Amino acid sequence: MGRPAKLTPREEDDILARLLRGEVAADLAREYGISKATMSERFAAVVRELQAIAAQLVQVENTLRALPPASQLAALRLAEDIRMQQGADRLLAQTLAPRFGQR
C-alpha cells in the first residue's frame, strides 16, 4: 500500500479549477503543501487536455455561428442524431456483450 494522498478529491478539483483560471502552479503547490513535481505529475496533462478541448469547442462554435441560420439548425439536428445513434450503439453493445462473452 502506498502513502496516503496529501490531497482530498475536493482539493484536487479546486486546484484544477484554479490552474484553469491561470493561477500559478508553484503558488498552489506551496499553498497545498505539495511539491511542484507532484503538481506537474497530477495536473499538467489534464490542464493541457482541457485547454485543447476548450479551444476546439470555441473553434466549432465560431464555425457554427458563421453559417446561415438554417444551416446552423441543420448542423445541430445532425449532431443530435449522431449523439442518439452513439447512445443506441453503446446500449446495444452493453446488452449484447454479456450474451457473447465480451466486455
Image (cartoon, rainbow, N blue to C red):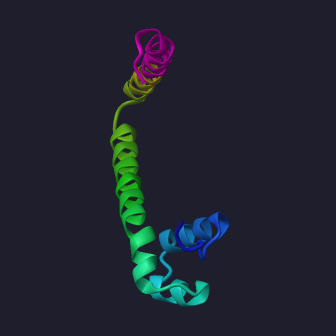
Above or below, 63 against 37 in this view is above
Residue closer to the observer: 49 or 80: 49
Q: Position of residue 37 (x, y in %)?
A: 40, 82
Q: Residue at x 63, y 64 (%)?
A: 9
Q: Position of residue 68 (x, y in %)?
A: 37, 30
Determine which quarter of the picture holds residue 47. Answer: bottom left
Considering the image in quadrants, where does the N terminus appear? bottom right
Q: Position of residue 95 (x, y in %)?
A: 51, 13
Above or below, 71 against 20 in this view is above
Q: Is residue 90 inside the magenta stretch? A: yes
What predominant SS class does the magenta segment belong to?
A: helix
Segment colored magenta: 84-103
Above or below, 72 against 48 in this view is above
Q: Residue at x 44, y 78 (%)?
A: 38
Q: Is residue 68 left or right of residue 73?
A: left
Residue closer to the observer: 96 or 48: 96
Determine which quarter of the picture holds residue 102. Answer: top left
Considering the image in quadrants, where does the C terminus appear? top left
Q: Residue at x 50, y 80 (%)?
A: 23
Q: Position of residue 6 (x, y in %)?
A: 60, 77
Q: Is residue 81 left or right of residue 60?
A: right
- How many numbered callouts? 0
Q: Is residue 44 left or right of residue 3?
A: left
Residue closer to the observer: 51 or 69: 51
